[in-house]
Amino acid sequence: MLSLPLSGGMHAGSGEQQLVVSEVSAHISIVGRCSVSMSVSLLPVQLQQSSPSAHIIVTAARLTSTSKQQVLVNSMNILRMNCHALSIAAVELMPFHVKGPSLPELIPGQWDSLIQSSHAASSSANNVAAVLLSEPHFVQVDELISRIQGVVPCPLVGGVAQPNAWGENPWGGQRSLRGALFLGNRTYHEGAVGCFMHGPIQMDALCDQGCRPVGQAATVTSSHGGTILKLDHQTALLVVRQMFQSLSDRDRDMQIQIGLDTLGDGRNFVARNISSFNPSDQSVQVAVADVPEGSVVQLHVRDPHWARHNILKQIQRYISQLPEEVRSNPQQLGSLLYSCVTLAHEEEQMLQDALPKSAFQGAQFQGEFGPVPGGAQTNSFLHSYSSSFGLLRQAF
C-alpha cells in the first residue's frame, strides 16, 4: 500500500488528505482440484468487498516486491498477484477495459474533461496520468497506447503479464497462457485494463532500456508490415550485415536487437527483437506489426552494466529536479515499477537507497510501457528488456 500524505488547499472532507495507491502482493494457494481461473477469479471480488470504494485493476506477475523489500518467490502451488488498488483523494479515477486498439469507453463527459485538461496550460489542479496492464496476446497494445496519447497527451506506464505468470498447473494440466485481467470485480482474458487519473496528481514517467545503441544508423526506404526490405535504398539484410561487421568483438558477443525510431529523428529508439532474416529477398523481419518507411534503424545490444549505470543516472537526475518539499519529505513520493523479467532488478534497490522513506511497489513483466529515455513524457511505447517507473506525488 502506497500512502502519501498530501498538503495544500484540497479539502474533500474532514481529516488528513491522503493519496493512496496500492499495488498489493498476495499469496493465493490453490485449494482442491479446481481450475486456476476458478481460484483466482475470487480475488478481485474479495478485494472489492474489503475496499468497496476502490477501483481495482489486477494482472499476474512472476515476482513482486515492495518498499519493505518483501519478495514473493515463485513456487509450483502458489499464485502471485500484482494488484493496483487506486483510491486517491481529490483525484477522479476512470477505470476501463478494452479488447482492441480502439479508445476505451468512458462515462459520458469524462473524455471531454480529459482532453480539455491534457491540452490546457500547465495546472496543478487538473493533471492527467494513466496506468495500463495488458494480457500477453494483445498484439495491438502499442496501437492502443498511441491512440490514447494522441487524444490525451499524458504520462502512461504499465506492463504486459507473462503467458505463464500463474505458474505451473500442479496437477499436470495445461498452464494458463493468456493470464487474466481484473477490473473491479470482473475478470477478463483479452485486451487490457487501465485507469486514468485526473486531478491534482503528478506522475513522472522514467524508463530505462537495457539495450545500448551501437554502430551506424540507417533509414527505412522500403517496408511491408514488420518486414524491412530496404535500408538507405539497399537491401536490408546487406546493410544489417555491414552494421554487425562494424561492431567490436565485445558488442558482437552480446545479444543483438533492432532499435526502431518511427519518428525518424534518430533520438527515440525502441529496442525490438529480430524475428528472422530472409535470404531470398534479403529482408529483415522485426517483431512489430509495422515498420513505417522513414523510420531510423540502429543496432542495439543488451548490456546490463550500461543499463545499471544509465538507470542510476536517471534516478539521480530525477531526484535533483524534484521540488525541495518532496526531497526533504520523500514519504510524499510513491513509485510503481514495471520491470522486465530478464533484468537483474537492481533499480529497485537503487530507488530505495536514494529515497529510503518513499513508498515503492513493483513487479516483473513480459513487456513494459513508458517513454523513451530523454523523450517526451506523453509519448509511451511498448519496450523490451526495460525498467519503467511511474513516480506519483501531489502536483505543485
Image (cartoon, rainbow, N blue to C red):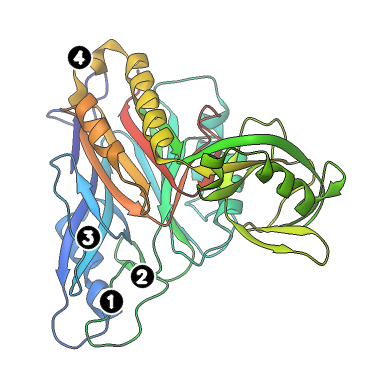
Going by the numbered disc 4, the residue's amino acid type is Ser
Residue drawn at the location 37% of the way across and 15% of the way down: 321
Front tag of 4 and 3: 4
Q: Quadrant of residue 68?
A: top left
Which is nearer the N-term, disc 3 or disc 1?
3
Question: Of all residues shown, which one is farthest toward the right?
Answer: 233
Q: CA distance from mark 3 to mark 1?
A: 27 Å
Which is nearer the N-term, disc 4 or disc 1?
1
Visible residue check, residue 18: no
Question: Of all residues shown, which one is farthest toward the top?
Answer: 324
For label 4, the residue is: 328
Q: CA distance from mark 1 to mark 2?
A: 7 Å
Q: Quadrant of the C terminus?
A: top left
Residue drawn at the location 35% of the way across and 84% of the way down: 174
Q: Is residue 128 left or right of residue 52?
A: right
Residue drawn at the location 71% of the way across and 36% of the way down: 217
Q: Are marks 1 and 2 in contact (CB under 8 Å)?
A: yes
Q: CA distance from mark 2 to mark 3?
A: 25 Å
For label 2, the residue is: 164
Q: Nearer the viewer, residue 366 or 300?
A: 300
Going by the numbered disc 1, the residue's amino acid type is Glu
